[in-house]
Amino acid sequence: MVIHGAGFARRPEEKDMDSSHTGSVPAETDRPGWFTQTLTQLFMKNAQVVDRERVADRFHLVTLESPQFQGFDWIPGQKLQVRIGSGLATRTYTPIEWDAENGRTRILGYAHGNGPGSAWVVGVARGEACHVFGPRASLDLRGAIGPVAVIGDETSIGLVHALAQHPERQVRGLLEVDDGARVRQAVARLGLRDVDGFERQPDHSHMEALVDLLPALAAAGTCFVLTGKAASIQRVRRVLKDLQVPSGRLAAKAYWAPGKTGLD
Ligand SMILES: Cc1cc2nc3c(=O)[nH]c(=O)nc-3n(C[C@H](O)[C@H](O)[C@H](O)COP(=O)(O)OP(=O)(O)OC[C@H]3O[C@@H](n4cnc5c(N)ncnc54)[C@H](O)[C@@H]3O)c2cc1C
């Protein structure tokens, strides 16, 4: 993995998120009402967390198992919504792979800060039950021809892995990140090689370094998948438009936007 911008000022060493995280998942003693229970039973799958591995700092690999996952015809790029707490609130994650025989999947959750999804990713324990909605359609690259570049951030690593499951597809990740060294650890754990990390700079100059790579990729017939922060997607989309990348070679999905919670 290549890190662009390593050596720039970095935030102070993070504390162990397991102990310092302040996000909270509503207490399970808040029993769901009949309406919530009915909708959960009708539309959600029962799953169990069979493993949670902290792969690097804020990155947690969560393995979910459910008999209802068995035989499912997963399409890489789909999303899975995990119910958070006792209401109907969910947070969205990307299955990085799918074992239809054993009814297992994994997600790579990035605990960015204070939010119930981050708290779940950090605090969920092996053996815990959960409810999930999906997998459902989100980004479908089955028709894509040629190499694929996923442009995003920490939340997009799972998607890079999912799309790279295709044996003949060349997938490259171009990701803006807070901490290149930690992202390198997470990426290595997943066995991904073709990922460039651009460490965020206060003046957003890291995005200039990232978009500098786009003309060569566009000329090579690359399909672009834009994910992560909404404002960064807009910026990259403008550059790709100027490069006259046809809309058929472009897919985008905002994963988060400052001030907005629980985008799906
Ligand atoms: C289709 C789809 C697939 C996704 N796949 C993944 C995945 O595989 N792994 C993963 O980790 N995330 C993924 N995400 C992103 C994840 O759902 C969001 O980051 C979500 O907001 C996290 O929930 P939360 O409860 O921690 O924060 P929220 O309660 O939703 O948000 C609280 C605050 O944090 C901000 N925020 C949210 N995410 C970030 C971030 N990454 N960095 C900085 N600030 C942020 C919000 O804007 C808000 O102001 C995906 C999102 C979508 C829509």
Image (cartoon, helix red, strand yellow):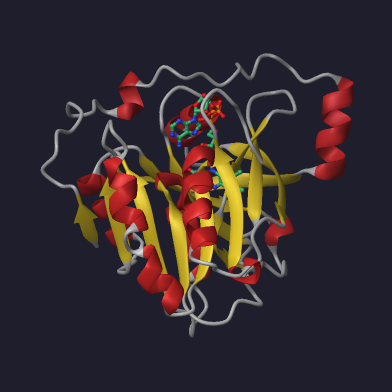
Any part of residue 26 in sight: yes
Of the 4 image quadrants, the one containing the N terminus is: bottom left
Task: Write down the quadrant of residue 69 in the picture.
Answer: bottom right
**Residue positioned 45% across, 66% down in the render:** 149
Q: In this view, does 188 lie to the left or right of 80?
A: left
Please tell me which residue is depicted at 60% across the width and 27% down the height of the picture.
Answer: 261
Residue placed at 47% from the left, 56% from the top?
239
Nearer-the-camera pick, 75 or 132? 75
Q: Position of residue 84 (x, y in %)?
A: 63, 30
Front residue of 212/87: it is 212
Return the residue nearer the eye: 106 or 125: 106
Instruction: Confirm whether residue 55 shows in the render.
Output: no
**Which residue lies most toward the left here?**
7
Image position of 46 with respect to 99: above or below:
above
Q: In this view, does 212 lie to the left or right of 117?
A: left
Determine whether 181 is above or below 263 in the image.
below
How far across and down, in percent of the image, does residue 258 sit?
A: 51, 27
Residue farthest bottom in this picture: 168
Question: As drawn, is 19 to the left or to the right of 39?
Answer: left
Where's residue 124, x and y in %?
49, 34
Q: How many labels does the image show?
A: 0
Q: In which quarter of the image is the C terminus?
A: top right
* Image coordinates for residue 154, horizontal then vertical, percent: 40, 46
Image: 111 above or below 232: above
From what the image shows, is residue 122 above or below residue 65?
above
Q: What is the quadrant of residue 18 in the picture?
A: top left
